[in-house]
Amino acid sequence: MHKRIHIRIFWGGAILCILLAGLMIRLAWVQLLLKDQRVNGTRYTMTQMAEIQSERETVLDSGRGRLYDKHGRALAGETVWTAALFPPEEKLPGQHGAEATKDDRQLHRLAEILGVSFSELKARRTGLKEPLLWPSGQGKAPLALTLPQAREVEGLKLDGVRALPFARRYDGLSTGRQWLGYLSEASGEALRQSPTGLRVPRTGTDGLEKTLEPLLQGVGHTEAVAQVDARGNRVPGSPITIKAPGNPYYPLSLYTTIDLRLQEGIEQLAREAGVKEGAIVVLDSETGDIAAMVSLPFYNPQQISPLGGEWNNRALQAAAPGSIFKIVTAAAALEAGLTEPAEPFFCSGDYGKYGLTCLHGKGHGALTMAQGFAVSCNTVFATLAERLSGMQLQSAALALGLGRDIGWQAENTLGLSLLRPLSGEQPGTIFTTLLPDDGGARVQTAIGQRDVRITPLQAANLVVTLLHGGEVRAPRILQRVAFANGQTLKELPAHLAPAPGGRISKATAHVLLDMMRSVVTEGTGRSLNRSRWPLAGKSGTAQTLVQGAARNNQWFIGYGPVDKPRYAVSVAIENVAPGSPHLATRLFGQVFGLLSEPEPGSTGA
């Protein structure tokens, strides 16, 4: 009996020893063989995960690529200084008194710098268990400090309080830069495919943020890290450290053609003018590059409303153009040899067909074709339309870059099968059905009504096309991609956007430019004669219906200065009440007032 008990004890002990030995071997295997193995769903090894469990961190830079204007000023990804609060060290008995009084004095000064009350700051800091980037009053974005403020915050030497550089994607303000787009939380699939390993990954959802997403993705984020104990207090004597990928090539820097000074100035002009809907586009007349592109209503990329639609770029959306389309009609008639600038006409105010009249039914009397262009006479252009075929109108429009996509693009570039930075560009229309044979359809089309739709970008590019003798350029918004160390990765040169059917002649383009000058000197744009630069252009008013109510689209497009053109501009103001003053003409003049100002730091002319 006793012998059996001893045997059982022996084998029980032996089995227990075997189990303990197996556990020890297992632990050793995990420690030695799996310490460098990545944990599923993360970019960290098991050893690193063990360390992270005793850390508290805050992301200072997502690692996403930066977007800059043509002069290197930040458009998205600006580095600012901000105040970072980390869990304080645990106070030991006897560490109060004089030290606490000094701490409160420093906190009072920090509260002044942050623009908050002492009690609010102290309440937020007390019991802090996670790092906090002090928020601005305009949302969740960290508060931006000036460099002197950042230096003072550092000089306070408050426990757990630092001034750190933060890569701010946007400044939280509403602007007309819908071409930038915005970011959204990445889906589960996007998260699995993301090379960044971000804890809260975000992906481009519209504009350049979306079209350039493959280039903007980084290789890891930069974070500030604090070591904490089991109670969440910072480990005494432990420093706040910065962890970064350390890759000299990423994130990439992407340089646009935008001039931020002009962009901001035009946004301010539109705001002061009270424009509710529309767009303003400024192109460099030499290159066709987009210098500024403002869309209204303004949007805030940090507060996107799914129903509001403010993020839609009106500069890329087609709208009825009205009489600015008479440039196309004139081009078609001149190219076909069906008219000349000196051809005489007579306008009684009522065309006599199709219910067409001139403005308010007032006649212009005897006038030439060129004079009819200057005063935007419907009778002159209805007559020309009846001489033309639908094919001739369509061909002239296509030759001038209307009714088709014109934005810059490149194939097999930077690892992308197609690089097309401008998203959502609409081609517009000339005719939505088969080319019409009836004169009424052609007449309405010839004055920019019926089915005609063009975008403000196309309208500005139409002017550039005329300035280049009928050669259509592809508007460019992205010009260079560089590594983080400044080394150029790829230059993206400008290119043409020719129509399959050919171009208009240089002679016709020259005649049209001269007639656009007469619009300002003796026509519908006479108010622009007071401009600092001599200007040329064409006005337009299109009749539309918005939810059954009569509304107008106002346009003015043109160039300046006339003697040596530098810019082509289109202004489109949509959905205004009929009979309203022509705000588009006035705003066009104000934009050129801004463009003609000397560059900051220059002596001017």
Image (tube, rainbow, N blue to C red):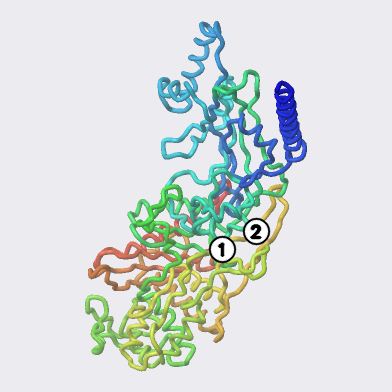
In the foreground, 473 or 12: 12
State the SS at label 2: strand
Mark toward the start of the polypeptide (2 vs 1): 1
Q: Which mark is residue 421?
A: 1
Quadrant of the rendering where the C terminus is positioned: bottom right
In the foreground, 288 or 161: 161
Q: Are marks 2 and 1 in contact (CB under 8 Å)?
A: no
In the foreground, 155 or 496: 155
Q: In this view, does 249 lie above or below 119?
A: below
**What residue did someone put label 2 on?**
480
Residue 152 can be seen, yes or no: no
Give residue 462's position: percent from left, percent from top.
Answer: 49, 74
Task: Tell me what residue is drawn at x 34 percent, y 71 percent.
Answer: 524
Closer to viewer: mark 2 or mark 1: 1
Q: What residue type is labelled 2?
A: Arg
Rendering quarter of residue 225? top right
Q: In this view, does 46 lie above or below 528?
A: above
Rendering quarter of residue 421? bottom right
State the SS at label 1: loop
Residue 98 can be seen, yes or no: yes
Q: What residue type is labelled 1?
A: Pro
Q: Which mark is residue 389?
A: none
